[in-house]
Amino acid sequence: MKELVWSLGLFMALGNASAQVTSYPSQNVCTQYVRTVASGYIKLADFEIFDQNQNPIYLTLRYNKNEYIWYVQLPTVGYCISPKDRAVFTFEGGQQYAAKMLENVNCKGSVTYDLADRDNQALLRAFLTKKLTLFRFTSDYKNLVSIIPPSTGTIISEVFGCMKL
């Protein structure tokens, strides 16, 4: 059975915040949302999307020496996620990019995408230059759709910029 899930909002760390689109990330966004681990070699940022039942979908961005890994933890799914399942990211202007999974099959509800992978390069460029407006995960068993508020899309874009600072 297919289920349509609408997010009620995207919150990061301690809550949602507004920001203006700039060429460079604001230092406030970098210090508020990005944490550094492993003696400064790895930077992490966490996001949380809530569905209509307040079930969280956790998103984590990890950056390490030009490697961008995007982790998605879906609500308990009750089936295995396979490479034929699709994650599509929509950005302002309507551009859509599908992401290629890093692993073959996962039965724990977690999906990993290497955004630096050649197949995901256009998606990485979009994250670095545009605001995310929609996240969609589609499979034979479940459809998840999360609408991203504009202010949060700006923060996500700025967080990607913070990773290289």
Image (cartoon, helix red, strand yellow):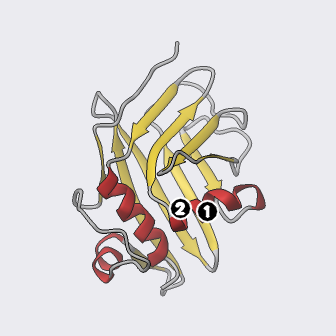
Please tell me whether residue 41 is drawn above or below residue 10 in the rendered image: below
Residue at image position (30%, 68%) is 20
Which of the two residues, 80 or 132, is positioned nearer the viewer here?
Answer: 132
Q: Can residue 99 be seen in this view?
A: yes
Q: Is residue 77 visible?
A: no
Q: Are marks 1 and 2 in contact (CB under 8 Å)?
A: yes
Q: Name the residue under label 2.
A: 127
Residue at image position (58%, 30%) is 138
Residue at image position (34%, 36%) is 7
In this view, which residue lies farthest toward the front?
Answer: 93
In the picture provided, is 26 more to the left or to the right than 81? left
Please tell me whether residue 123 is drawn above or below residue 104 in the rendered image: below
Residue 146 in which image quadrant: top left
Please tell me whether residue 153 is drawn above or below residue 96 in the rendered image: below
Determine whether the residue tagged by mark 2 lies in a helix, strand or loop.
helix
Which of the two residues, 103 or 31, is positioned nearer the viewer here?
Answer: 31
Say what amino acid the circle numbered 2 marks: Phe
Determine the CA span between mark 1 and mark 2: 5 Å
x%, y% of residue 40? 48, 86
In the picture provided, is 129 more to the left or to the right than 19? right
In this view, which residue lies farthest toward the right?
Answer: 118
Which of the two residues, 59 or 110, is positioned nearer the viewer here?
Answer: 59
- Point out which mark residue 80 bears: none
x%, y% of residue 103? 71, 48
Pointer 2 local density, CA inside 10 Å: few below 14, some 14–19, many at least 20: many
Determine whether the residue tagged by mark 1 lies in a helix, strand or loop.
helix
Q: Mark 1 points at which residue?
A: 124
